[in-house]
Structures are given as C-alpha cells and as structure tokens.
Amino acid sequence: MGLEKLISSITKELSGERTKQLTGILSQYHRIQASKEFLAASEYIYNKLKMLGDNNCQIHEYIADGTKRNYEWYAPLSWDIEDGELIQLEPDEQILCRFSETPESICTHSKDTDIEGEVIHIGSAKPEEIEGKEIGGKIVLTTGQPRAMIDQLKELGAIGVIAYPSEERAKGHSEMIQYVGLWPNADNKEKSTFGFSISRREANKLILQINQKKKVIVKAKIKAILYEGNMHVLSTKIEGTKNPKEEIILIAHICHPAPSANDNASGSALLFEVYRSLKSMIDKGTIEKPHRTIRFLWVPEFHGTVPWIIEKEKEKGFTPIFCINLDMVGEHPVHVGYPFTFNQSSISTPSYLNDVISDVIEHVKDNPAAIEQGGWQFPWNCRIVSYSGGSDHILFNDEPFRIPSVMFGHPDTFHHTNLDTIEKVDQTTLKRVGITTLATTIIGSSLDKYSDIIAKAYVTGYQKRKAKLINMVSTEVEKTEEFQENKKFTYRYIIVEIIKKFVENEKKSIELMQKQFQFSDKMMIDFLNNDLMLLLSNILQYFPVVFDQNIETEYSVIFQQIPKRKWKGPINSSKLYEIMSSSFKLKESSQISDKQLTELQEFFKKSSGVYGGFILEITNLINNTNTKLDILTLLSLINWKVLEFQILEDILQLLEYLEYIVF
C-alpha cells in the first residue's frame, strides 16, 4: 500500500469531530497529578477502551508521597480539593476568585485554610522589592512562581501567596488566570502554605489600593487535603504479530486543571481516537495487524512516565523503537493562531523518523479529505523545527532507552491558564494531526510493507541535509579567510570534523533502517551508502580544507576530554529550565562569572526557546563516550552553523559547577 492510499484509508476512519467531543468531556475533570480527579479521567478512557473490546488496558499505580525518587525525579504528593475562595473584605468587599468558577484560581497543593489577612505587594519577589517591607503575618501578592518561594515565604513569615500574571504573560488578556502551584515535597511540606491565582486586572485594583496606603484585607478559604497517595498511568497496546517485544510508543499527558482543553485534553482525546481508528481498520481488514507492538500511554506528565520507564527497563526483551508525544494538538488556527509544530527528534538519536513524518505531513497538509465539516476549511499552517523539551518525549530520547522521540503540538498563548477552553479546539487540526500520527505509526509497525515509503522519505531528507551541509561548509570556510593562521586552521579542522560527523550520523540512520525493516529493493540503500562515500572526497576537492594535518596540542587535548554524567536516567529538565531563568543565581564560590552566566542565559534564550532544546541536546550528547569535539560537531549540525567552542566550554563548566557532570 502506497502512502497516498494509506492516508486515504485513515481519513475515512479517523474523526476530528469525535476527538473534539472527547476533548470537551476530559476538560471537565480537574486533572492534577496524583489526584482523584486525574484517576477519574483515566478511568473514563479505560472504560471506553473496554467498550471497544480492549483486553490489554491497565492502570498502573505508583507512589506519590513527595519522597519516592525515580531516577532524578521526585514523586509529587497527592492532593485533592473540594472548594476554595478568596474574598476581599477591606477597603472594598468583593469576591476575587472561586474554585467552583475557575479551578486555576487555587494554587495546586495548597493547604487547607480558613484565615483573614492583610495583602502586601512584592512585585516579582526580587530582593530589592522585598527589602524594608514588613511581610510577617501577611499574604504576599506577586508575579513570582509560588513553587519557587516556599522557603522564602516561610523565612519572611508570610502566611500565604496570591499570584498574578506578569505584564508580558497577560498581554492582551488582562482577565487571564494562570495555572500555578506550590508543589511541596516531603522535605518542605510543613513549610508550605496556601496560594491563590488571580487575573492581572484584579491584581491591578489591589495594587492601586495598596499604593494609596489603603489596608487590603482578604479572607482566604480552601478545603483541600495534601497527603501521601498514588499516581496513575493508563496504558494499552495492540500487540505485534512478529516482533511483539519491539514497541512504538504513543504518549499523551492527561494532567492539568480543568479545563486545559488543548493542554492536554486534546492530546489525550486524540490518542484514544488513534487507538480506536487503528483497531477499527485492523478489524475491518483495511490494514493487516502490526508486526510490532503499538503502545498507548496516558500519563501524569513526567512524574508518571518516569516510573513506567523504570518498570519497562526491567522487562526482559523490551525494545522501544520510537516515540510520538501528542501535546497540545488541537489549537484553532484563528482563536489561537499559532501553526502546528513538529518538534523533530534529537541529533543524538539519528534515524529515519523525522524524514518519514515530514513526508507524511506533505501528503496531509493540502488533502481535502483531512478537513472536517465543522472545522477549519483552509490549508494546514505547519512548521518543522529542531528538538525541543517541555514534555514526556524527552524522557524516551534520553537514557535508558535513547530512542528517536518527537513531539506534535502548538505554541499557545492560553496554555496553563483559565482561557484554554474547548472553543479554542479545532476539529480539522485534530484530524490532520491524528492522520499524521497514525500513518507514521502504521508505517513504523510493519517490517516490510512500507519499507519503500521509508527509503524514499529518507532519500528526500538526506538530499536536503546534504545541500545544507555543503552550503554551511562554503559559508564557514569563507569566514576563515580573515582569521589569524592558528585560529583559521583550528576552525577548518572543526569543519572537517563536522563533515565526518554528518557522514557518521547518516550511516547510523541507514543502519537503523536496515536493522528494523526488510527492503525488497536495495537500490536506494546502495545509492545512499555510495553517495556518502563520495561526499567527503567531493567536498574536500572543492573546498580548501585539509584532513591530515594535526591541530595544536592544546586543542587536541581539550577536544578529546569526555564529560561524564553524574545523574542516572533521563535528566530532570526542571533544573535545566531554572538555569535559563534570569532569577537563577550563582553561589559566591563559583568559578563562573555573572557576566558568563548572563551571556549563556541570553544564548539559551535565542537558541533554545522556552523549553531548552539546545541545552537538552547537550545533556543528551553527554553519554560518557562523546568527547567535547563530538558534542561540538553534532551541535553544529542542528542549525548548520559552527558553534563557537567557548560557548560549549562555558556550558559544560556551568553543568560541572551544578554537579551534573565530571571530567
């Protein structure tokens, strides 16, 4: 079956309308990790799977006590809320927020409370904004993140916190209420307090009154329980007929407060629709049963995925192939406005996956059969970008599995706020993402039926990458003409190593294709191997780069140094995001200057975006085998530009200071 015929078959089965309906149902659950409502949402999908005749679905249970450590990840505490409200008593009397109206208005993991107190404004909670203020016994109003302030609030004697969005976050949406939480663990549970989240509009009113020297008194009431409990992961599978231990993993996180329609009721609903459509197509005989197992996971983001990975790591013979993460996949092109984004797999896991997905998207984006009657009627606005963090795919890309892992999603102004509602979900977008997901999965689950599609997609991708490499070499060699001799030679030596690394990575991808699929026509594989053999000689014949000379001893020693991991399993990305924050501070004993740190943070901001793709690429490449030169050359292939070696040195020095690595 060709790709067009496969996509045509899927368009007749997979429904964006049905997916949106389920998204609406899931968005009614207050799906905080390790809560009863999260379990209820999982059980709802579990029961729907059972109604389809699924006998493989199960709900895994893991400890959620704030103490249990899975790799570098601590399990959250369980938390359930019944109700809560914040009422202003003085100088005006008004209701500021109610949980029953806006679930985001209560900070997750807030303690049970019934108290009156004075409100004091501390801005973003910088030292200069706090200095000289009497905070003891008061409730602080801040744009700071409550979860990062537990110790600080206790030290200052504050009794609670009211969070509101920064001007940048609330731009154009003064009514926006953020999803924020306290997230205490067993160590600081007793220090933790309660918190509310209000809109910038309401916060501005309070700030005005405070600035006018009026005493602002509020009554805070929350009925909630914070306890040692359990978190849950829902899984099912369609078992492979030939290589059942080999699994393609499709994952979506159910968690986040009601409604959180796009983030991530949309991904969870689409994951179910992909399962339903696949099962239906198999039952009808439209497609044959998969040769490899296809796994479906509904998780509490990060915290539930990690113990599931640990569980599977112990399973004899378990061999994951690749992972697709569905995170915020239904955004309406008008009501939200951002394009669909395919975040490719990491440079550390070379494979055919990015090329196959790109080819599928090309066949879906203008396909009239992928348009739903009640949805967006125009061509698909989509973009393909490099690897990024932010969700569960990064856990599969890193140790212990190190498999190609991608994310499908959208940027979204409204995510993690009360404005992430069902009317911002589009049926056509859901259908297009669903078709892309299912087509890629079916292609990857067969040993031989779709191998020609994979080979052709890879050849197309390879030719594009080769053109980018040649252009990069031309541009970068030209730069060196103005360099001093020593720098010129070292720079050109790095360029040569980048070319070598390009060839090495492409060969790894080809070998993976040959290992995982059976090719009836070997012509394309032979073409790729022969073309790679010619690539080095052709480039070197055209560009003045010399292979055989040795670089200066100083650099040869530095380049061959190997950073070693001090952490186990997938890295805890929250710590890396903290490094990128302007609020992150170095200890006095640090060998890194504040200037270096500021420069790195600016670099991360430009190269990584919010979710730290670039710094995660570096941690992925730290595998106790790669040298500094290996890491430098691979990083240079991401944006097709030679990375300045000093930047890598500074980043590694920062990671060493933070005790992530050792040499």
Image (spheres, grey):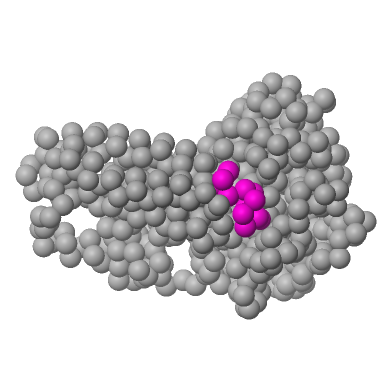
Name, please, the residue furthest toward the top: 378
Seen at 72% across and 74% down, the residue is 63
Seen at 90% across and 59% down, the residue is 53
- Measuring from the top left, give residue 469's x and y in whole percent: 32, 40
Question: Is 440 displayed left or right of 559 in the figure?
Answer: right
Seen at 82% across and 25% down, the residue is 373
- Measuring from the top left, give residue 663's x and y in whole percent: 30, 71
Give the residues drawn in magenta, as a range. 443-454
What quarter of the picture does the N terminus occupy?
top right
Depth check, front residue: 424 or 14 = 14
Seen at 25% across and 52% down, the residue is 497
Question: Is 294 displayed left or right of 373 in the figure?
Answer: left
Question: Is 100 displayed left or right of 186 in the figure?
Answer: right
Q: Would residue 514 be visible to someone looking at this image?
A: yes
Depth check, front residue: 13 or 657 = 13
Is-magenta flag for residue 388?
no
- Measuring from the top left, give residue 45's x and y in whole percent: 85, 55
